[in-house]
Image: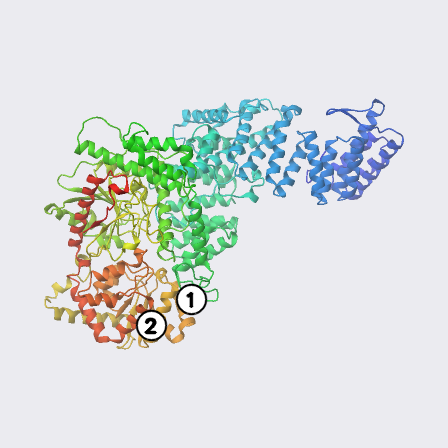
Amino acid sequence: MAYASDTCRSPAPDIDKRLQQQTSLRSLLAAAHEAYASYPQTTSRDDLWRALRLLDEHTARLVEDGQVSPVIRDGRQLQYIPAAAASTAAVLEAWLLGGCIAYSLGDMNRAIEWNVRILRVDRCYVEAMSNLAAAFRAQRRDADAEAWWTRAVHLRPAYWDAADHLFSLLCAQKRYSDAASVLNYVEQNATSSSSPSADFARYLAIVHAKGTLLYALDDHLSAAQAFSRVLAHAASGHPLAENSSEQSLLQLVDHIRSALQARYGARLLLTPQEAQACLNDVFGGELPGLRAIANSQHRQAVAQTTANTLLTLAKILQDAIAAGSSGATGGGDRAAVNSKSSELDAAENVGASSTKTEKTATVATLVRIMGRMPTPHDVLPMYYLSLALHASPSTANNIGILLASLAPALPVPYEHMLALEYYRYGLSLDSRHPHLYTNLGSLLKDQGRLADAVGMYESAVACDPNFDIALANLANAVKDQGRIGDAIKYYRRAVAANPHFDEAACGLANALGSVCGWIGRGCAGIENCGVDSEGSIVTHKCPGWISRILEIVDGQLRNLLAWGSGVVANEYAFIAGEIAMACGYSSTGDIRMRPWLEELERIKSSCGSDEGAKIVELLETAARHARWRSYRDRYIDKSGEPAEYHRPLLPSSLSLPPAPTVLPFHTFTIPFDAVQVREVCRRTALRVSVSAHRYSWLPAEVYPPPAPPTEYLKIGYVSSDFNNHPLSHLMQSVFGMHRESSKSEFPVYGICYATTTSDNSVYRQKIEREAHKFVDVSGWSTQAIVERIVADGVHVLVNLNGFTRGARNEIFACRPAPLSISFMGFAGSLGAEWSDYILADEATVPKNAMRQLDVERNQGRILRHHQVENEDEWVYFEDVVFCKHSFFCCDHRQSAPDASPLNDLKITDTAARWQAELVSRQKMREELFATLPADTIILANFNQLYKIDPGTFLIWLRILTRLPNAVLWLLKFPGLGTVNLHDFANRWAGSDVASRILFTDVAGKEAHLMRSRVPDLVLDTPECNAHTTATDVVWAGTPILTFPRNEHKMCSRIAASVIISAVAIEQDVNKLITNSEKEYEDAAVALCSDSAELYELRKRLFLNREKAAVFDTPRWTRDLEKAYWIMWQQWVDKGGAVTVDEDPDRNIYL
């Protein structure tokens, strides 16, 4: 008998009368049991006290009469002294009941006293021990409670109540290892003393609880072994069998999978209704372990325990597979958290809440659990069977997540539709399940149904107002809707709910930065100006949300250095073998393997530092060598002998590396140093690399190289931005101009691969019409796109996205073309082994930002990124194609709205053109700012507000203070930022200066180009420059003043590149490009103080634009075509180079 808490009791009328009428102890026991069972429904506290008193009186008389004798135990067998056997048993039962009654009445001292009476007579009475422990626990005497429950469990391991209570006590004290030891003892010793038919359910529950606890402790292997034993017992029909190894689990999983595939096909795409019925397909309608159990409650308990076990074991495998081999788009538009919230049933989360962790099982552990590397198609059947045994919303949730992860890259794949069904089915089981709403919202967001996604996230938050993942996802979604203020509110709530939620903290920082919400920003990193919690300027390091971001990223980057640690030591032979096969060597003993083996030895002796990245770099170098060798064998040497060009595999124990929380695009405006920028991009690229290597559809050999170019070199352009987007504004004529290359020395054939559907804009139509070939691959899977590029015979593949919204970097990581180059999309290095070149110029990529390799020191070395002289300065992983002029393409001379009107007006001489421009400018100035006095100087910046940092804004305020007749024209980009900037201007410079900051709405492209002529001077943002906007204002003839603040950030130097290629005379370069913040401020004041010089500068810019290199798109295109051919020839000649000294300088100078 154990203490009950809230069991339902039947009514017992006239309890008091019945108690008073009993003369024998047995009859009194029956009446007292009835009274206890009906408390508090029909039995009063007074009735229970009366029962307790009568039991005390009856048992006391029996003791006085010598009717109670000590109990003798033979081992664990009870032996009463024959003369007093019946009365002793009755008295012990009465004392046990009396202890329970005292406990229910809250009299713990009396409960302790009555159970101690029992133990004086029978010191091995485990029920009394357990109840005594419960009374001690109620008095918070946990040590005494633990001692008595431990004794009870050791005496009778199958006394489940004692085991449960002891387990709960230890978990409450966070002594999880001790709790696991208790369950382990019970599991090992309960078999011989328990009855399988009666105790099977409790036994399985104990083993399952042990597995759940071990899972919470991150001991995934031991947890899986425990779960495997539950499944072996439940499925075999031999409940207490001792053998349950990974072999039995593998057999069981294979049986479930085979049975379902036989019925539903290899893809295993079952609807919720089919999943619920799959028990018939797997076990003929009944779990084998249930066949010997008649009791319906026991059958239900076993079924639910088995279902929960399948759920948890499947989740272990699912999480680890996702961490080790999932695909990733690598796009820059990933939400800060678009988290898939997988979970377990609350009923089995014993101890888990206190030990919550993000760790997953390693690939090596997975192999040990299953006996082989499991796949998602092993996990799905486990979830289906779990759902058939017990209809759980958590199981439906996890099935939805897994199905969504299996979906190919199509607009609306069937897997997504099925995942939606499971989420909705789960909600039919529990309409207030926040995880289901959250994941349903994420899937709808992935499908472009943003408004519906917001509704689901709102429902999740309504169910659980402190659900951090739902709050962060809701913030991401409303931010995408342009509701920045609401996004900030939800990010704040997510951070308040979980201060250690890095994704929410970074999302909040980015949202605040986008609207100049600088209060509490702090000052950190390489910046020297910030804002404290009171909104005041600080010029020293100060804690705040920007310093929090740097702390998060620094911690993540340090931890990521340990990724892959120990893999070389454990899989040395495998890695060496993969390299040898890729290089075409007969064995790892080939003399040509020496540099490879030396690198492996260096990695092995480096104590695991950056080991995973070095392994990937080595294997990608081997893959490039294989592709080059294939080309040489087929087209140069023409040996004709069959050969293999093995695609080297990653070691199975090398899991998918985490990516930093901060996306590469965010490095533009966060004050990171060179190492931080480099590593954020590199780690993001590594995740893309490993994901691509794990694609099951990749062929065993590297893709065959294209045939040598005959008439032309084939160039493939991959982009999501062949629509009304700045990229198309800038490059729209380039693809048609490639057609003219057929007459040049460097002919190319351009193929555009559009990864987004057409918006029917004039830009899309022009590119589709003029390109040699235009392929809409927006509805294609990654595999289909890659195979199409291979089939098209592309020589050089161009990445026009990089790490920006809509990127498909996994295409490049699969290496469908021998060479790749990145430009125009992402202003910086991709940090990727799958990106060979970046297009730049000497202004945007200074020498210090490139790898400085000491060739002598690196003789025989393969790894180019790990023996660099300027370790703290370099950023660019790629080799650089240096353009003679600006690398930045601008099509305004062909497509700007004012590119042709001059001809229409028959104005040919420069003086007349300039006078016409002045008239147009004055007219537009009056239209925009009708109330401004004629002598007002208009300063402007047309960037999005996220590019403005506190230090830059403070300089602008000082410029306004020094120029009393000047105004600053900014855009409501977004509108919420205008309030913040006005507030800071008032705080830092006073109301007069603040009143001279003017905001207008953002204009369409053509209108924006035309009104770019209005300002007298455009002030650039030094941390992240104007890019497209810089070409817009220079085309309009408006001077732009810049300060290329950082050598390690291309985004900080593009305006300088544009200026250098736009001005007519060298002196103008020196006037518009400054070298410090002080120079920047002084130059702005000087230019605006000399109206004549500013007038002449504007005139020179405007009249030179037809000749300026930055607007000469035909020349830019010819230079690019030349670069493609040089890249290709270098690859043909030296593409198989392995060591640094074989090809020390791959940079190209046009």
Q: Is residue 819 left or right of residue 165?
A: left
Q: Which residue is mark 1?
A: 539
Q: Quadrant of residue 1131?
A: top left
Q: Which residue is mark 2?
A: 959
- Residue 691 makes an appearance in the image: no
Q: Residues within 10 Å of mark 1 (few under 14, many from 20)?
A: some
Q: Earlier in the sequence, mark 2 or mark 1?
A: 1
Residue at the spot 43% in from the left edge and 55% down from the top edge: 550
Gap in Å between the C-alphas at discs 2 and 1? 19 Å
The one of 1038 and 9 positioned closer to us in this rendering: 1038
Q: Quadrant of residue 515?
A: bottom left
- Residue 1118 makes an appearance in the image: yes
Tell me the kind of residue under disc 2: Ile
Residue 1137 percent location from the top left of the image? 25, 39
Tell me the kind of residue under disc 1: Thr
The one of 727 and 104 positioned closer to us in this rendering: 727
Quick check: 585 above or below 656? Answer: above
Q: Residues within 10 Å of mark 2 (few under 14, many from 20)?
A: many
**Which colour scheme appears in the figure?**
rainbow
Q: Is residue 547 left or right of residue 78?
A: left
Quick check: 140 above or below 983? Answer: above
- Figure quadrant of the N terminus: top right
Residue at the spot 12% in from the left edge and 63% down from the top edge: 903
